[in-house]
Amino acid sequence: RVALILGTSTSGILSAELAYRERAGGPGEGALPAWFDYRATHNTGSVVSFVRDLLGLRGPAFAISTACSSSAKAFAAADRLIATGLADAAIVGGVDSLCLTTLYGFASLQLTSPEPCRPCDAGRQGLSIGEAAAFALLEPAQQPAPGAIVLAGWGESSDAHHMSAPHPEGRGSRAAMQLALARAGLQPADVGYINLHGTATPANDSSEGAAVAAVFGHGVPCSSTKGMTGHTLGAAGGVEAVVSALALQHGLLPASVGTQTPDPAIDLPIVMSPQPLPGLRHVLSNSFGFGGSNCSLVLSRGEGA
């Protein structure tokens, strides 16, 4: 009764790309090579099958593929399974590996940067693609232990604005943040740090900045950690949930690596270097995907720590 929910955008598609290059008769012709296993690599659910078999799990197991919000949504899905009694606990997270489809796809949209990405920077030129995996264990607790990291709330929404551009005013992302706060029973002033989606594309950062300001005003410290990791796509929500949990655990706000000159149009207090904040109690992590698929998570630290 331990569930497994993972987010991914491309799974092991690189294997399929290499297999098509080796087709008998050359590219575009003949049979795929014998070594290629679609079910175990290309298929989105392959990452779930691999981890499920590795850990010997027998509970509900599935993948979520909603672009860059995938593994954040895994947390929300797991919470629902536990709340409805379909699982006693859940392993959640995300994984994405580099592949040519992703690299060339983002390049064709003119969204990649020729230099390491600079989130929320006045001179930002686009994103840097990364690859990663991140996992967490969710289990119910009537009385969380002092200092325990708690999934306090989550919010999901859809802009339905454009397939590859966010709503300029961040309507969907604003709704996701408001829903997450409501589920957590918190007010905007209760949040001490926001881990931005912060991809370093001009449109994303300005849209998210407007949405965050509309919900929280201009006083909550914010940073994007994609300057450290690159944009890990379907794994980003999981990676940044772990970063947010570590921020709570250590009372330390992570810096927005790569940001040199904060964009004055993004009127938020960007964390330029790591900042100790021992009393940090609640953080919010944003993950906003192509097609307007949005998810915000609120993580909290158990009282008494």
Image (tube, grey):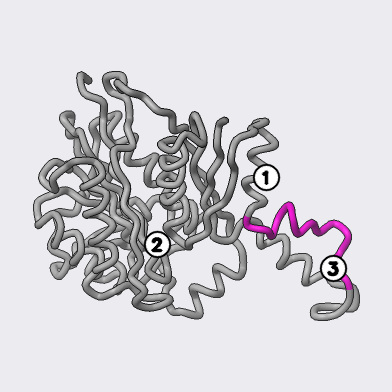
Numbered disc 2: secondary structure: loop
Q: Is residue 13 above or below residue 105?
A: above
Numbered disc 1: secondary structure: helix
Task: From the image, tell me which residue sits under label 3.
Answer: 32
The stretch of residues the image draws in magenta is 31-44
Number of other residues with Cα within 10 Å of mark 3, as a class: few under 14, some 14 to 19, many 20 or more = some
Q: Could you tell me if the residues under marks 1 and 2 are in contact, i.e. CB atoms within 8 Å?
A: no
Task: From the image, tell me which residue sits under label 2.
Answer: 116
Mark 1: amino acid: Ser
Q: Is residue 159 above or below residue 78?
A: below
Mark 3: amino acid: Leu
For marks 1 and 2 on the same chain, the one whose residue lies earlier in the sequence: 1
Q: Distance of mark 2 from mark 3, alpha carbons?
A: 37 Å
Rendered location of residue 146, percent (x, y): 27, 19
For marks 2 and 3 on the same chain, the one whose residue lies earlier in the sequence: 3
Between 54 and 196, the one lying in front of the other is 54
Q: Nearer the viewer, mark 1 or mark 2?
A: 1
Label at residue 49: 1
- Residue 247 falls inside the magenta stretch: no
Rendered location of residue 209, percent (x, y): 21, 64
Choose top left, top right, bottom left or bottom right for residue 49.
top right
Q: Nearer the viewer, mark 2 or mark 3?
A: 3
- Residue 37 falls inside the magenta stretch: yes
